[in-house]
Image: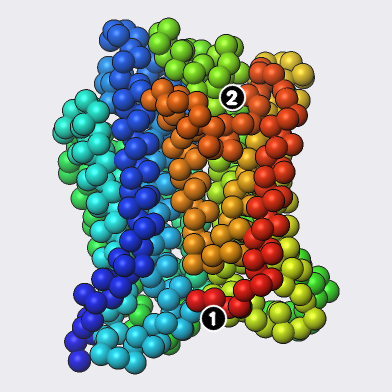
Amino acid sequence: MNTFVGTRHLVRLALRRDRVMLPIWIALFAIMASGSAGATKGLYSTTDELASAAETVNSSSALRALYGPIYDVTSIGAISLFKLGPLGAALVSILAILVMVRHSRTEEEAGRLELVGATVVGRHAPLAAAFIVSVGSVVVLGLVTALALAGSGLAAGGSLAFGLAWAGAGAAFAAVAGITAQLTHSARAATGAAMGALGVAYLVRAVADTSASTSWLSWLSPIGWFQQVRAYQTERWWALLLPAAFALALTALSFALVQRRDHGAGLFPDRLGRPDAASTLGHPLGLAWRLQRGVFFGWLAAFLVLGLLFGNIATNVSGFLTSDSATEMIQKLGGLETITDAFLSTELGFVGIAAAAYAVQATLRLRSEEAALRSESVLATGVSRLRWAWSHITVAVLGSTVLLLGSGLAAGLSYSAQTGNGADFGRVLAAAVVRLPAAWVLIGLAVAAFGLVPRWALAGWVLLVAFLVLGEFGPLFSLPQAVMDVSPFAHAPRLPGGEFSAIPIVALVAVSAVLVAAGLAGFRRRDVPVT
């Protein structure tokens, strides 16, 4: 029997299932890139201003570690997209990992591949379909982004190189996820291992970019390969062969590994658990924390690093903004007059959105547990529906709170150490904390969707993307304030430096509470599970 028979049908099935999610994410990346290019293009009127801004980036170890160096200090494309270079490639890689695991290990863990495998479907067909969908998605994303960038006025050649370099990074980590899906027995473990590999690759690239003596390390990282393409500078088209060869090699290896493991199992044996369960597992909250703690600690590490970097970078931001128009852009985004406060407000706004993303992910664990039929086992005991639901909601609320507190503490310590003013610590920490109620509104929306219309549970992600676009690009595109006010993030006080008002904080908390109550009321009245 042909081991790849049925691949075409599985690809069609996967694309049908992701017919909403994938277009949204592709559009989001293209809008982010073209919006950044369009907003930055007119900020520097002379070559000297471009060179000065680029040299500020290159002279800061923190900026190089986070975003990478700028090789051509006179390239408007390089300046426009330096924040979406390696960092954007990492985000595309995350999307590729999620799609790859979703259509391989997740399907196997849920038992759906066993049903499919009982039909005329070859042994390699599910993995082949997952590769086609994940790699095809990032390639389409890269091409759409390239078209958007060229449409914003940047050079067509550089735009194509940038889009393909993004796609190359995504394809490389789709292949990494293909390997981890064979090594582990669960989707969570496969995703965690692939994300860990991505984190190591980004760290290796960051170390390579902080010193000339370690620059050779960039060649060892798939994220570093993105930089070697040198989009909008002196394009190295041959560098695109590196991620392509890497992806092909790991893809071949993953197909070989499929033959060496049992269906539903991983090549790595399962770690034996404790002979007796911990006492905390006798409570729904303890179980919810046990299920989510690994993901939470990964998020926490990222938030601490981001806080330290943003606090360090803030003291150098005035050197990067060499023109009045560039300064005006940051002030417009931050809504403040002082450029450093405006920068911190803008960056902490991004951190708040990231905390909301964690909150949505943690809340939607309710839906994944229900869909996998694991919730029934808990509800068959003396645990009520509300106690079970509240356990995961509590993890989402407390988790997002700790993430923002951690990032605020790290940013405050870093910034106050740079300025030598202890009062700056409290100002920055408060600026992070006031973003919490907006994140809680996303929890409310996710709970409402889960309880009232569970098939629309992913609406939490869709709304988060919509709010991100409104909040981050609305001021640049001069959208009406009434439109931008739809986003809960628009109502967070503009701290540090702005005026604090308790009214929007109380209103956001009230909205989130009403949404959670509505969702829980719906959950009490509907069937469990709903598929």
Query: What amino acid is at disc 1?
Result: Pro
The tally of labels here is 2
User: 215 above or below 517?
Assistant: above
- Residue sitting nearer the eye, 497 or 446: 446
Q: Which mark is residue 246?
A: none
- What residue is at 38 percent from the left and 70 percent from the top? 103
| Relative horizontal placement of residue 429, taking residue 359 as reference (left or right) | right
Label 2 SS:
helix
Where in the figure is residue 149, as x and y percent of width and height? 25, 33
Where in the figure is residue 456, as x and y percent of width and height? 49, 62
| Distance Cα–Cα, label 1 vs label 2 | 46 Å
Whether residue 151 is visible:
yes
- What residue is at 61 percent from the left and 78 percent from the top? 528
Whether residue 208 is visible:
no
Residue with the mark numbered 2: 344
Q: Is disc 1 surrounded by few (<14), some (14 to 19) or many (20+) residues within 10 Å?
A: few
Tell me the mark number nearer the camera, choosing from 1 and 2: 2
| Relative horizontal placement of residue 175, taking residue 403 as reference (left or right) | left
| Relative horizontal placement of residue 274, taking residue 191 as reference (left or right) | right
| Relative horizontal placement of residue 81, taking residue 304 as reference (left or right) | left
Q: Which mark is residue 269?
A: 1
User: 374 above or below 429?
Assistant: below
Where in the figure is residue 60, as x and y percent of width and height? 49, 22
Residue that protrudes farthest toward the right in the picture = 279
Where in the figure is residue 45, as x and y percent of width and height? 30, 9
The quadrant where residue 173 appears: bottom left
- What residue is at 54 percent from the left and 81 percent from the top? 269
The tag earlier along the polypeptide, 1 or 2, is: 1
- What residue is at 39 percent from the left and 57 percent from the top? 21
